[in-house]
Amino acid sequence: MSNSSQLLALASAIQTQVTAIHEHLASSGQAGPSFNGQSPETNYAGIDDIRAATLESLTRLHDLLSTPREILQHRSPTDFLSRHALDRLGIYDVIPVNETRTYEQLSATTKQPVRTLRRILRHAMTQHIFYEPQSGVVAHTQVSRLLTENSKIRDYYGTVCQEVWPAATRTVDALEKWPGSTQREESGYVLATGKPLQQVLDENPAKHKRYDNAMGSFANDRTFSFEHVIKGFDWASLGSATVVDVGGGVGTVSKALAKAYPKLNFIVEDQPDVVANAAVEEEEIKERIKFIEHDFFTEQPVDNADVYFIRRVFMEWPDDKAVLILRALLPAMKKGARVLIQDFYVPEPGACPLWQERRFRASDLLALALENAGQREFEDWRALFETAGPDFQFKGVTPVPNSDVVFIEAVARG
Ligand SMILES: C[S@@+](CC[C@H](N)C(=O)[O-])C[C@H]1O[C@@H](n2cnc3c(N)ncnc32)[C@H](O)[C@@H]1O
């Protein structure tokens, strides 16, 4: 296909895809997407795969039609400057979602000159954060409303601006200073702040709270929604089985699984201070969830479980430590017992839509900047189990439809 025919093919795909979206929205009585903060958010349930395919076609068409120079200009190092300023100046708190404010009113509240506020807000407006229904008057878009109403998402971007951004500016210095290091103490974050992230969080309760809240923002999205855990693996096929939730926090995920699968029993393991805050209130699952204190770098205390489930743990540890976590399971594992991991994953280049791959790779570099950590590709997961020892048989990586997550599976050879 010639390059210009490719443009036509993409345009035609977009026409078909958008027609399907339009028909779905019309038949479900929805007005369709709008940036206006007063409009309801569009519900794409049932057509999310078509929406994703449309975004892919659009991304490719947009990039193909951009000149090389424009491609370089698509992202600016100051993209986050206005978001950082809006967060720090508390602009979200001074414009109620159904109201408007003039720049003069905002100036009186924030003590910043009108011109500064105009520059910052008008930059943010190019990212659909606020808009001016008439010149000089600021109103909410759906994006600014989301940041105003959803404290978790706001805290996520607060963390991005105040922790990730400074770390990113020093990450290449760290790479030069400590080539190939995977130590948290040798990250861009440490060069930017003088301390590893965990220490900064431990010493600053407000930052800690914001960080924890930020992590919670993934609970309902394409990354770590419980729904992907519940539906993404055939738990029912295990029958009556025992699942050890290694590093399972206060058991939130085990509780959701226990409700969905009445034949499963769970043992949730975590550090003593976490287990101390864990409890099960619900009668229907109370008998099927136990908590124990366990350091996952030491030998696994629960013998002969069917599944050792490890979710959102490996993303925090470099390979040398991840291997230790895997090896600590082996003495307890019977033949055929599974290690089931749910974690971040980066597909091979081109194996998923470009807009999605950009997100995966951005989050990979985010982990590098903050903690010298990183996301793993297929080969990395396979190599991890290989290094952990011949007693593991790596089974592969299974994507969960309509999500950004995968299940990574291995069994004990016994
Ligand atoms: C990101 S959280 C994930 C929690 C849970 N698996 C989930 O998906 O919601 C990582 C968990 O690992 C636990 N953790 C960290 N170091 C640990 C260790 N050495 N032994 C056991 N748990 C640990 C933390 O306390 C935390 O609950």
Image (cartoon, rainbow, N blue to C red):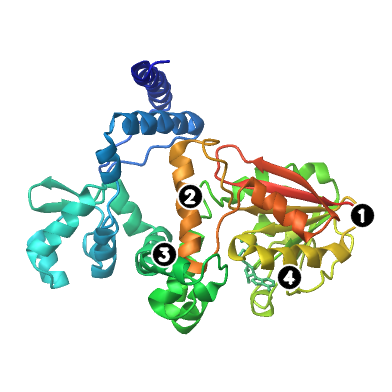
List x then y, in percent, for residue 389. Answer: 81, 58
Can residue 259 be seen in this snapshot? no
**Are circles 3 and 1 on residues that touch, CB within 8 Å?**
no
Q: Position of residue 58 (x, y in %)?
A: 36, 30
Give me the residue at 66% from left, 54% from top: 256
- Mark identifier at residue 172: 3
Seen at 34% across and 41% down, the residue is: 40
Upstream in sequence: badge 4 or badge 2? 4
Indicate the secondary structure of the residue bearing disc 1: loop
| Label 1 close to label 2 by CB (< 8 Å) | no
Q: Earlier in the sequence, mark 2 or mark 3?
A: 3
Question: Residue type at mark 3?
Answer: Val
Q: Are marks 1 and 4 in contact (CB under 8 Å)?
A: no
Q: Give me the C-alpha separation between circle 1 and circle 2.
A: 36 Å
Q: Amino acid at mark 2?
A: Arg
Q: Is mark 3 within 8 Å of ligand 1?
A: no
Precedes in sequence: disc 1 or disc 4: 4
Asked which quadrant contains residue 172, the reply is bottom left
Looking at the rendered structure, the kind of residue marked 1 is Gly
The mark lying in front, picked from 3 and 1, is 3
Q: Secondary structure at mark 4?
A: loop
Q: Quadrant of ligand 1?
A: bottom right
- Callout 4: 10 Å neighbours few (<14), some, many (20+)? many
Can residue 306 be seen in the rendering of this structure? yes
Q: Label 3 near label 4: C-beta < 8 Å?
A: no
State if disc 3 and disc 2 touch (CB < 8 Å): no
Mark 1 or mark 2, which has the lower sequence index? 2
From the top left corner, tell me how far across and down residue 221 is, in percent.
50, 48
Q: Where is mark 2, residue-wise?
A: 361
